[in-house]
Image: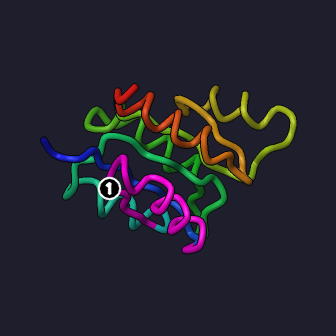
């Protein structure tokens, strides 16, 4: 059976490598850094889950990525978990309302990340 695949949309390499290290025994983790790279990657690669940073470089941030994902029938059922430094009061609710399936604030709790990834990959 193929290993589950996650796309982590994140512009900081250190954060991306940390997540890849934490999840190395659970799934394969791929990275894109911005809106354009994400929608270049997705049509060519099947993923089971997206971890999404909200503060991305360029004109289109993570909310724009989320809007396109949720409005495209090819990706609308793909679970999206915000993994972001937006951790002020109300940010979690705002991101869930925008269409994220779940939320993890940075700095992240390693066990929380593993638990939520397993949940959305149906590995629990």
In the rendering, at what x and y percent does residue 9 appear?
49, 58
Quick check: 47 left or right of 81?
left
In the picture as drawn, the residue positioned furthest to the right comes out as: 89
Seen in the picture, residue 33 relative to 121 is either above or below; the reply is: below
Whether residue 120 is in magenta: the answer is no
- The residue that disc 1 covers is 28
The residue at the point 62 percent across, 48 percent down is 110
In the picture as drawn, the residue positioned furthest to the front comes out as: 25
The residue at the point 32 percent across, 38 percent down is 75
Seen in the picture, residue 3 relative to 19 is either above or below; the reply is: above
The residue at the point 50 percent across, 43 percent down is 66
In the picture as drawn, the residue positioned furthest to the left comes out as: 1
Seen in the picture, residue 64 relative to 102 is either above or below; the reply is: below
* Magenta highlight range: 13-32
Mark 1 element type: strand
Residues 31 and 107: in front is: 107
**If the image is split into quadrants, where does the N terminus sit?**
top left
Quick check: 88 left or right of 121?
right
The residue at the point 79 percent across, 44 percent down is 87
Quick check: 73 left or right of 36?
left
């Amino acid at each position: 059976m193929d290993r589950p695949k996650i796309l982590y949309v994140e512009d900081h390499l250190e954060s991306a490598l940390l997540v890849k290290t934490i999840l190395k025994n659970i799934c394969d983790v791929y990275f894109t850094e911005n809106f354009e790279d994400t929608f270049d990657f997705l049509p060519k690669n099947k993923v089971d889950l997206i971890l999404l940073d909200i503060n991305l470089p360029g004109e289109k941030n993570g909310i724009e990525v989320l809007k396109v994902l949720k409005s495209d029938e090819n990706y609308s059922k793909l679970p999206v978990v915000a993994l972001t430094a937006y951790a002020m009061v109300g940010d979690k609710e705002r991101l869930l309302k925008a269409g994220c399936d779940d939320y993890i604030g940075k700095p992240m709790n390693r066990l929380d990340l593993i638990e939520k990834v397993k949940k959305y990959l149906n590995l629990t």
